[in-house]
Amino acid sequence: MNSSILINGLFIFMLAGFIGFEVIRRVSPLLHTPLMSLTNALDAIAVVGAIVLVGEHKSTLSAVLGTIAVVAATSNIVGGFLITDRMLKMFKSSRTTPKS
Amino acid sequence: MNEFAGSQLIIEVIYLVASALFILSLKWMSSPTTARHGVWAGELGMLLAIAGTLLHHGIVDYKWIAVALVLGAIIGVPLGRVQMTAVPQRTALSHAFGALCVTLVGTAEFYLRTPDISRFMMAVLSMEVILGSLTFTGSLMAAGKLQEILPQRPLTYKGQNLVNFLLLAIAITIAVYLVLHPEARQLYPFMLVIALAFGVLLVIPIGGADMPTVISLLNAYAGLSAAAMGFVLNNKLLIVAGALDGSSGLILSVIMSKAMNRSFTNVLFGAFGQVAASTAAGGEAKTVRSATAEEAAAILSAANKVVVVPGYGMAVAQAQHKVRELYDSLSKRGVDVRFAIHPVAGRMPGHMNVLLAEADIPYDRLMDMEDINGDFPQTDVALVIGANDVTNPAARTDASSPIYGMPILDVDKAHTVMVIKRGMSPGFAGIDNPLYYLDNTLMLFGDAKAFVGSIVRELTGGSHS
C-alpha cells in the first residue's frame, strides 16, 4: 500500500463527504424516511467487495464469510430499493391528480 | 496482463458512472416530484456496479455468487414489503445487515492479508471491523426494541458509562497492538467480540423515545464502516457510497438531536442523557375542560384554519385513515386543514410523513415545525392527536422542566386547542403538560381512532350540501 493510494482515497472521501452534506441538507424532512432507506440500499454497494471475495475463493473461510456477506448486502439492496419506491409512490400532492 | 488491465479499466469506468448515479440519486431525493427518479438512478448504478464487478479478472467461481445473490433477493423482498409502521425496525435491521456484510468482509480480508499488511491498512481494517460489529449488534438491539421483542424502557445500571468506555478502550487498544504487530492474529477474535458486546451495551440504556436519534447514528456508523472498507479494498465507489451514507446519517442525527434538545457531542458519543423520570406536578388540583365529539365537530366546522398535530400515539391507535376522513370532510366545507409534523413525531426521521402519506393525505399539507410555528397565532383550532411532549409549553417557559429548551410546536398559541387523549396520564417522558390546563384548551377524552371517527360522523351527518 503506497501513500499515493491513501491520499487518493482521502481526497475521494473528503469530496464525497462534502457533496453528501450539501445534497442531503437539501432533502426535505418530508422524505427523511425514504432517504434513509435509499442511502441504506446504496450503502449495500459493499456487496461488490463481498462478491470478489467469494469469486476469488482464496480460502474456505473467506469464501464462506463472503457468501454470507453477499446474502446480507443483497437483501439490503432488494429490500431497500423496494420499500423506498413503495413509500415514494404514496406521496401525492393535492395540486396534481394522482398519476397511478 | 494486457487483458487484465483492460477489464480493470472497464470496471473502474463503470464504478465512476455508478458513483455519479448515486450522487444524482440523492440529489433527486430533494423533492417528492423527482424522488422516484432517484430510486431508479440508484438501482441503475447498483446494477452496473454489480455487473461490472462480475468482470473482475480474479473471479474463478460464480456458483456461490449466484446462490448468495438469489438468497439475498429472497430475504430482501419481504423486507421491502413490511407495513409502514414497521419501517423503523426494518431500517434498523438493514443497518445490521449492512454492517454484518462489512464486518465479515473485513474479517476475511484480515485473515487473507496478515501478517504482511501495512500499518495504515491494518488501522483502517480495524476501524472497519470495530465500527461494523458495534453497528451490527447495536442495530439488532434497536430493531428488537422497536419490534418490542426487547423491553423498550432503558436498562441502566451503575457505572454503565464506565463499563462501555472501558470495553471500547480495550477494543481500540487491541486494534493499536495489531497495527504494530499484525502477526498477533490470535488477538483479532477478542477485538471482534468486544466490539460486538459494546454494540449491545451501547443501545441497551436507550429508551423507545430516543430511537429516531439512535437509528440515525447507527446509519452514520454503517456508512463510515463501509467507507473504511472502501479504503481497505481500494474501491473508490465504496468510499463514495460510504461517505454519502455517513454524511446522511450524521445530518439526520444532528437534526434529531436538535429536535430532542441534545447536544451534538451527546450524539457523537452515544451518551443519551436520560430525562429525569418524573417531576412533581403542581400541588394544587388543576382543572381541565373537556368536550364531546359533537362540540368538537361544531368548533371545527366553524373554523377557517385548522392545524392537526399528530404524534406517535395516533399511529399506535391506527387512526391515520380516520384522520384523513376528517381532513376530507373539513376540506369540503372550505376549512383550511394542515398538519404540523415535529421532527421526532415518529419512531425514525420523517416517519410520521410516511404514515400520513400512506393514508392519502397530500404531502403539501404536511408542514415542518419551522414552517408552521409562526402560523399558530392565526390558527383557529389546533387539534392534537396522540402527541404530548412535543406540544408541552413548559419546554419554552419552565426552566426547571426536564424538556426545557426542546423545540416544540406552539399549539398553545392557537385560538382553541383540542387534545385527543385517553386520560390525564403523562407522556413518554413522564412530564406533566401544562397545555391541558390552559383556558383555551379542550380535552377530548377517548381512543384516537374512535374519537376522530365520531367527529367525522358528526360532520358528515350534520349537514348535506
Image: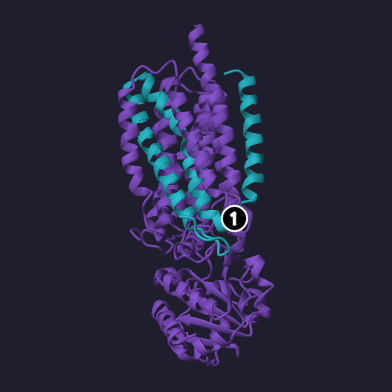
- Indicate whether B409 appears above or below B266: below
Q: Whole-percent x and y of residue B308?
A: 54, 75
The residue carrying mark 1 is B266
Q: Position of residue B457 (x, y in %)?
A: 42, 84
Q: Is residue B402 left or right of residue A48?
A: right
Give B7 or B116, whichever is nearer the viewer: B7
Note whether B40 is above or below B424 in the view shown. Answer: above
Front-most of B415 and B329? B329
Pick out the residue farthest to the top. B1
Q: Residue at x 31, y 36 (%)?
A: B71
* Residue beneath the point at 42% across and 74% down: B322
Q: Residue B91, position in %: x, y?
A: 44, 51
Position of B141 compared to B28: left or right?
left
Chain assigned cyan: A
Element on which disc 1 rests: helix
Determine the colour of chain B.
purple
Q: Position of residue A100 (x, y in %)?
A: 45, 55
Residue B143 appears anywhere in the view: yes
Q: Quadrant of residue B437?
A: bottom right
- Report the amino acid beneath label 1: Asn
Instruction: Tell me which residue sits at (54%, 44%) in the image.
Output: B38
Q: Is residue B197 visible?
A: no
Q: Residue at x 63, y 71 (%)?
A: B404
Q: Chain of mark 1?
A: B
